[in-house]
Image: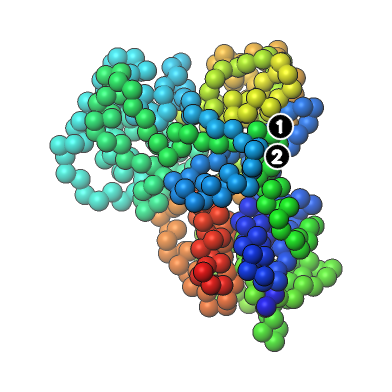
Amino acid sequence: MKVGILGGGLTGLILGYLLKQKNIEFEILEKSDECGGLCKTIQERGFTFDIGGGHIIFSRDEEILNFMLNLLGNNKIRNRRNTKILYKNYFVKYPFENGLSDLPIEENFECLNEFIKTLNKKFDKPKNFKEWIYQTFGKGIAEKYMVPYNEKIWNYKTEDMATFWIEGRVPKPPPEDIIKSSLGMKTEGYTHQLYFYYPKYGGIQSLIKSIEKKVDNIIKTFEIKSIKKEKNKWIVSNNKEEREFDKIISTIPIFDLVKALNDVPENVVNSVKDLKYNSLINVMIGLDTDKLNNFHWLYLPDKNILAHRLIFPKNDSPYMTPEGKSSLTAEITYSEGDLISKMKDKDIIDNIIENLDEKKLINKQDVCYKKIARLKYAYIVYDLNYENNVKIIYDFFKEVGIGLCGRFSEFKYLNMDACIKSAINYIKNNFGG
C-alpha cells in the first residue's frame, strides 16, 4: 500500500512519522518550499518570530506532551505562565476571573456580586455562547471582558456562536476561586497550561524540523490542483506531474480539498462554503531595549486597539532576540473583505506601533525591526450551523474514502497537542494499533 498525505504541516508530518514506524510506504505533498504550516518561524537580524502567532507546548495528555518534548531533546525551556489582561489601564491576572482583585474596588464588587447572582438562579440550557458566558460568569465579568474579548478574537458575535465546543476550552471556574480572587487570595485558572515548554532555540519550527528529520518522502512545492480516482487508485496532480496512491489522507484546508476534487455534491460544496473561519495578521516588532516586561502574553479586549493579543517571545526563551534587544508580536484577527483585510501592511504596522506607544507598552522610538505576516487560515469559528455542516462534509468524505486529519481539514480548533493526538488516533483506527 502507498499512502498520500496531503500537506506537510504538523499533522501531515506526524502522520508520515507514524506510517514510517509501521513500514507503510507514503509520500507527503507540501505546496510550500518548507514544512510547518501554522508552525513556521522566521529568523532575521538576530530576531526569531513564530509567524503563526503565539505557540506554546503543553497538554493535558502526558503521553502527547512527552512525545513533543522528546522530539525537542535538550532544546527546550520550561516556563511558569505569567499572563495579563489589559483592562482599561489595569493589568489584570489571566484568566480574568482569577484576577478580580486587580480591578478597582467598585468593579471588583460588581463582578463578584453579579457572579453570586448566577449561583442562585435556574437557567434554561444556553442557546448560544453569549448566553453561556452570562450564565457562567455573570454580567460583570461577561461585559467587562468575556464578551468583548471573545467577539474580538473570533471576529464574530457571541450570540451567533454554538456552545458544544466550550467544555475543555473555556473552563468553568469553581465559585470558591472567584470569591478568593475578589478578596485577593491567590488562585490559578486554566491550570493545564500554567506550566508550558518552548524551544530554547529556533522558535516553534524547531519542533517541526525535529519531526521532519525523521520523515522521508516529502515532496515540496507540490500544490495540489486536482484529485481523482481511477481504477481504485487516487491520482493527485499539481497540473505538471501526477502522484498515484492507494489511499490519501488530507491535512490541507477543507476548502482547498473540495476545490481539487471533481463531482462533489452540491450540498457538500454548500456546507463547505458555509463554514466560518478567521484569518490572522501578525505584526512582529523588534525593540532596542533589553526588557519590556515579564509577561508571556497580554490580552487586549479594548476594541480601539487592532490587536487582540501581544506575545513577548524573549520571555519564552531568552534566545529569541539579539543581546540587549526585545520583541513582541501583535496578533490581529480579520475576515476576508472586512476593513482590516483591506488595510495596507504599512498602515497596520504604524497603527499597532502608535496604539502600543499610547498605552505605554512600548516606546515607539525603540522600534528597530518591523515585519508583517498574513495567514489566510487561522481560527475555526463554531457558528450555529457548524454541526450540521460538518456532518454533511464528514459523511461525504467517509463515503469516498478520503481521510481528514488536522485543524483545517477536520475543521476543528485543534491545538498542537490535539493535532498530534488526531494523527495518532487516525493511524490507530485505520492502520492497526
Residue 353, visible in the rendered structure:
yes
Name the quadrant of the N terminus: bottom right
Return the disc, 2 or 1, that comes first in the chain's sequence: 2
Disc 2 on helix, strand or loop? Answer: strand
- The structure's colour scheme is rainbow
Residue at position x 57%, y 13% in the image: 360
Q: Which mark is residue 347?
A: none
Q: Residues within 10 Å of mark 1 (few under 14, many from 20)?
A: many
Kind of residue indicated by mark 1: Thr
Residue 39, visible in the rendered structure:
no
Q: Nearer the viewer, residue 55 or 79?
A: 79
Q: Across the whole image, how many numbered discs are drawn on residues?
A: 2
Relative to 381, residue 266 above or below: below
**Residue that badge 2 annotates:** 41
Kindly indicate whether the residue at mark 1 contacts the one at mark 2 (C-beta within 8 angstroms): yes
Query: In this rendering, would 25 be left or right of 398?
Result: right
Residue at position x 79%, y 52% in the image: 33
Estimate the x, y position of residue 252 in percent, counting from the top left.
64, 59
Query: How far apart are labels 2 and 1 at the CA level?
Result: 7 Å
Relative to 21, residue 313 above or below: above
Q: Nearer the viewer, residue 285 or 295?
A: 295
**Residue that badge 1 annotates:** 48
Estimate the x, y position of residue 161 in percent, counting from the top left.
41, 49
Residue at position x 41%, y 24% in the image: 93
Query: In this rendering, would 25 be left or right of 168?
Result: right
Q: Quadrant of residue 305?
A: top right
Kind of residue indicated by mark 2: Thr
Disc 1 on helix, strand or loop? Answer: strand
Estimate the x, y position of residue 191 in percent, counting from the top left.
40, 36
Q: Residues within 10 Å of mark 2 (few under 14, many from 20)?
A: some
Residue at position x 71%, y 32% in the image: 48
Query: In this rendering, would 234 be left or right of 159?
Result: right
